[in-house]
Amino acid sequence: MTALISSLEGTHAGHVTALCLALLAAILHAIFGALQKGRHDPWLSRAAIDACYGLMSLPLALFLVPWPTPRLWLLLGGAFVIHVVYKLLQAMTYERGAYTVVYPVVRGIGPFFAVIGATVVFGEHFTPGQWGGVMMLMSGILGFAVYNYRHVSVDRDTLVPALGFAVATGAFVALYTTYDAYGIRAAADPFTFLAWFFTIDGIFMPVFTRRRWRVLPASELVPLLKRGVLGAFVAWFSFGSIMMATRLDKVGEAAVLRETSTVWAALIGWLVLGEKVGPRRLALMVLIAAGAIVVELAG
């Protein structure tokens, strides 16, 4: 598998594969966000997911992938710190704000800073047309936040600080996307980076939330663990897909395409949950999709 990935790097086939992986990551990330913001405490939801994917990844890391080099250990340590801050900000965001409002803000801020980060770190260049596509996509995503803000009736008293945390979370989305892309490119075997990242990343939240577990009703433990197992699989394939996309092709383009997750979240709500879309939300979805297409075609 590693040899196949290496053969695709820098090729047209690699570009197409990266495009598909980024879109897959967008769909899975929409599902992942909903899992964390479900009926359970978002801190415990995240802890359950992290614990499950950490335990799932440990045997892969120990027995199936090459051992990390000293340099890669340092990069994994940096990734751990960045993701800890990101998770704390994300949990504080979801704890205070309605998911339909704060999620689009997080995802809408991310692409702008991710493209800038890719320019600085990897020397990537976005054409004026691609920047126009980024602005279209961001406008559509943030438009979802404004629309939902006007119609949401829950968490109104804490929504303003939640929006502040959402902006900070979006900035860290861009930071970890850029940093982790650098890390997976530095690894001779990309699966070494992924397996050890998930193993190490799964430690913090279960330990940090240990007091919250003590007051969790016994009847909620099994449903929460089921959510954790499902979320672990979704997280592995979502994060793994976007990281592979950034190894195969441009980081900025992959980051932008992933943020179509807002469209997929709305489509899931419409097709699966029976939510109404309406002409305004439909127009915003079209704007986001059009922005992503422009980014791709104008490159």
Image: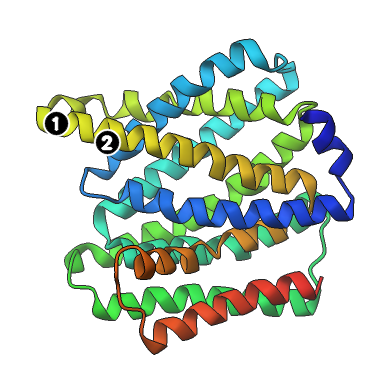
Q: Residue furthest bottom?
A: 279
| Quadrant holding the C terminus | bottom right
Q: Residue 248: x and y, percent?
A: 79, 46
Q: Callout 1, which amino acid?
A: Leu
Q: Residues within 10 Å of mark 2 (few under 14, many from 20)?
A: many
Residue 113 visible, this angle: no
Q: Residue 5: x and y, percent?
A: 80, 37
The answer to which quarter of the image holds residue 226 is top left
Q: Residues within 10 Å of mark 1 (few under 14, many from 20)?
A: some
The answer to which quarter of the image holds residue 194 is top right
Q: Residue 66: x and y, percent?
A: 72, 15
State the residue at coordinates (56%, 62%): 259
Residue 286 visible, this angle: yes
Contact between labelled residues 1 and 2, with CB atoms less than 8 Å apart: yes
Location of residue 206 with respect to 70 vertically, above or below:
below
**Please, what secondary structure does the residue beneath circle 1 have?**
loop
**Please, what secondary structure does the residue beneath circle 2 have?**
helix
Q: Callout 2, which amino acid?
A: Leu
Q: Which of disc 1 and disc 2 is earlier in sequence?
A: 2
Left/right placement of residue 21 relative to residue 38 reads right
Location of residue 23 with respect to 139 vertically, above or below:
above
| Quadrant holding the N terminus | top right
Q: Residue 77: x and y, percent?
A: 59, 26
Left/right placement of residue 27 relative to residue 278 reads right
| Mark drawn on residue 216 | 1
State the residue at coordinates (41%, 81%): 281
* Count of residue discs: 2
Residue closest to the eye, 3 or 140: 3
Q: Circle 2 sits on which residue?
A: 44
